[in-house]
Amino acid sequence: MVKRLLTGLLLVIVFGSASGQEIMFPELSGYRKNTDFQVFGPDNLWDFINGAAETYLTYGFADLHIAEYKKGKNVIKLEIYRHIDHIMAFGIYSTERSPSFNYMKIGAQGYVTDGSINFFKGNYYVKIRTYSKSEKTLESVESLALRVAEMLEGSSDMPAVLAVFPSSGKKINEEMFINESVLGHKFLNRAFKANYEYGPDSFSLFIFDCKSPEEAWKSAEAYLASCGTDALESASGKYVITDGYNGTIFLAWKDSRMVVISGLSKDQADIADQYTTDVLR
């Protein structure tokens, strides 16, 4: 834990000096803006979101800036979480969204639910909320969200890897980025995940984009070894293995990309092969 805190503190120091953008909170017509809040970093995020802080640190949290807007009894709270890169910002955003939310085009993607608008853009994950049920206040929340999205630097695109997932049967708005311990294994990190329906069956597909073919091979080899399977000396391959925690796993890789499928049975290898082939071609 101490090592993670020190690492996170180093990241915020480096990131804060390199990223350049100062957080300038926009005005909101009719509201009094208060920006006199502490800026939280990796070492004290627990003071603000307590138990959730660990998850944010897992996704390269750098710092948090807060503002509050008041108009009479109506209060709008704005939180801007800065992460070390665009993928990490998507990652933390993806852990808190649900396919049932009302999605809107803001930043790279955002959603509206119960008086809140959450979205991500560039390295930023933004959360805006009010407890007011007033229609005018809710309109002000949206107006503020759009202004913040325009103000923030960075890409308004979804991570490019998401386009690699086969579209057939893919569940909408359930894609995720998992930075650590994919499928509960410490040796599996940095994977994009999508969920699928194939007839009556459901399964998950994970894409690992490694830094090199050697890294992809080492990741595959570690998984095979953990399941008691001897790895073949091959630059690429497809395996069906039994994971004690996750059941049947289909594993394949090519060059620097590795694919894992969970949720299918051993007699559904044809389905797994269809999807892995689409990703690895």
Image (cartoon, grey):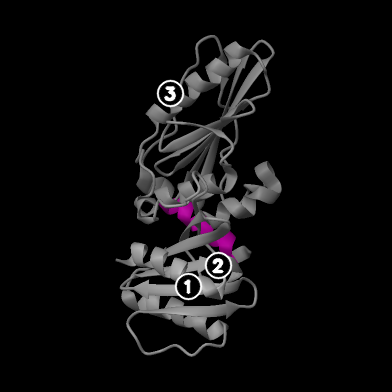
Which residue is identified by label 1?
269
Q: Is residue 218 magenta?
A: no
The x and y percentages for residue 48 are: 66, 41
Which residue is identified by label 3?
147
Q: Quadrant of residue 40?
A: top right
Amino acid type at circle 2 is: Leu
Magenta-colored span: 3-14
Of residue 61 and residue 259, the one placed in the foreground of this image is: 259
Q: Quadrant of residue 247?
A: bottom right
Of residue 25 and residue 209, the one placed in the foreground of this image is: 209
Q: CA distance from mark 1 to mark 2?
A: 8 Å
Front disc: 1 or 3:
1
Q: Quadrant of residue 234?
A: bottom left
Q: Is residue 268 left or right of residue 217?
A: right
Q: Is residue 88 left or right of residue 51?
A: left
The x and y percentages for residue 271 are: 46, 66
Q: Identify the main secondary structure in magenta.
A: helix
Of residue 257 and residue 88, the one placed in the foreground of this image is: 257
Q: Secondary structure at mark 2?
A: loop
Q: Secondary structure at mark 1?
A: helix
Q: CA distance from mark 2 to mark 3?
A: 45 Å
Of residue 119 and residue 276, the one placed in the foreground of this image is: 276
The x and y percentages for residue 136 are: 58, 11
Amino acid type at circle 1 is: Ala
Picture layout, residue 148 above or below residue 46: above
Query: Answer yes or no: do the residues labelled 1 and 2 have beta carbons within 8 Å?
Result: yes
Q: CA distance from mark 1 to mark 3?
A: 49 Å
